[in-house]
Structures are given as structure tokens and as C-alpha cells.
Image (tube, rainbow, N blue to C red):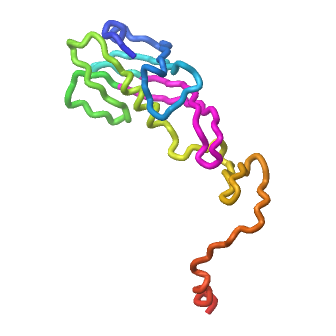
Amino acid sequence: MQLFRNELQIGFDKKDYSISVESLDIPNSTFAEPNVSCVLTCKSENQGFKLNGNLSCNLLIQCDRCLTEFQNHQDILFSLILTSQNDLHSEDNNEIIFFTEDMEHIDISPFIKDTIQLSMPMKILCEKSCEGLCSHCGINLNLQSCDCKSRKIRAPFKKLDHLISN
């Protein structure tokens, strides 16, 4: 996604961008739609340009417990500072990208790609109450109950129970 210096200098408020999923090339991710929506606001400041944005996309992902594929909507807020100052440090959780005075445009696609990847949850669940699959027969316990009768109870410390009872 290319941003041009002349647009950034003028500034803009809630400008819509549509980013092709193919251009982002995010590995191991399947999107429900061909584009990611990005709404950006830009303000010119003394240290450079401050961008506030919202990425919106629908991912097709697989539940870690029941292996069902489902659609997950992501709304990701971000702040970004484009600056030519080497020594600028951010106190407000802003990301900083070096943007020198002689550059006429900048590609923020790598930042957007990283932001989407980092927003993915560590544990992907279709629902908080997902029961997963039966470890014995493999039935999806969210859809039907399991009729497994013989579940061997593993109790490796059973012989030590007499120590607790004393």
C-alpha cells in the first residue's frame, strides 16, 4: 500500500483503502474476501506524519479443538509514525517507520502484513465453550454426544494415594 508524501502533507481523515490479500502474501492464512479494508487518518506533526488506522478483514481459520473451519472477523486498530528523525522513541505504543525527506512515497504493506499476523490469537477457538473432539472415537462433541464406554483411566500415581490418606 503506497502512501505519497503530497497526500500525507495535506493530511486526510478516515480515507478508505482496499488492499489485495494477494499483495500482502500472508503465509498460512486464508481470507474470506479478496481484499482487506483499511481506514486511515493522517496528521502532519513536527516529527513527521502520524497515521491512525483500522484494518478490517475476515479470515477463514480452523478451530484448535474441534478442527471446524469458521470465519473470524478481525478489527485491528493501529498507530504509526512516519519520520526522518533517527532518535525518535515512541511512548504511546506507536510503531515508527523511517521516512526520509527525499522519499516521495512509502510502502506500508509490510507493516500491515505484520499487524494482521500479530493480531491472530494464540489459541484459535470457534467458541469459548468449544468441547473439541473425543480423544477416543474422534466425534465432534459440539455436534453430538459420545458413546465411548471404556475409557481407561490413567492414574500413574495411584499407588501413592495411601500416603495422602495418613
Residue at 68%, 60% in the rendered image: 136
**Spot occupied by residue 6 in the image (x, y as percentages of width and height):** 32, 6
Main SS of residues in magenta: strand
> Residue 86: percent from the left, percent from the top?
20, 28
Q: Judge left or right: residue 79 versus residue 55.
A: left
The stretch in magenta equals 52-80
**Going by the image, does 118 lie left or right of 101?**
right
In the orientation shown, which residue stands out farthest toward the bottom? 166
Residue 54 is covered by the magenta coloring: yes
Q: Quadrant of the N terminus?
A: top left
Residue 136 versus residue 127: which sits nearer the camera?
A: 136
The percent position of residue 163, horizontal first and vertical second, equals: 58, 89
Is 136 left, or right, of 15 in this rendering? right
Q: Residue at x 55, y 27 (%)?
A: 31
Name the image quarter holding the C terminus: bottom right
Number of numbered callouts drawn: 0
Q: Is residue 8 above or below residue 57?
A: above
Above or below residue 120? Residue 137 is below
In the figure, residue 159 lies in which quadrant?
A: bottom right
Is residue 41 magenta-colored?
no
- Residue depicted at x 63% and y 32%: 71
**Image point (27%, 22%), residue name:** 83
User: Residue 103 sits in which quadrant?
Assistant: top left
- Residue situated in front as seen by the camera: 1 or 158: 158
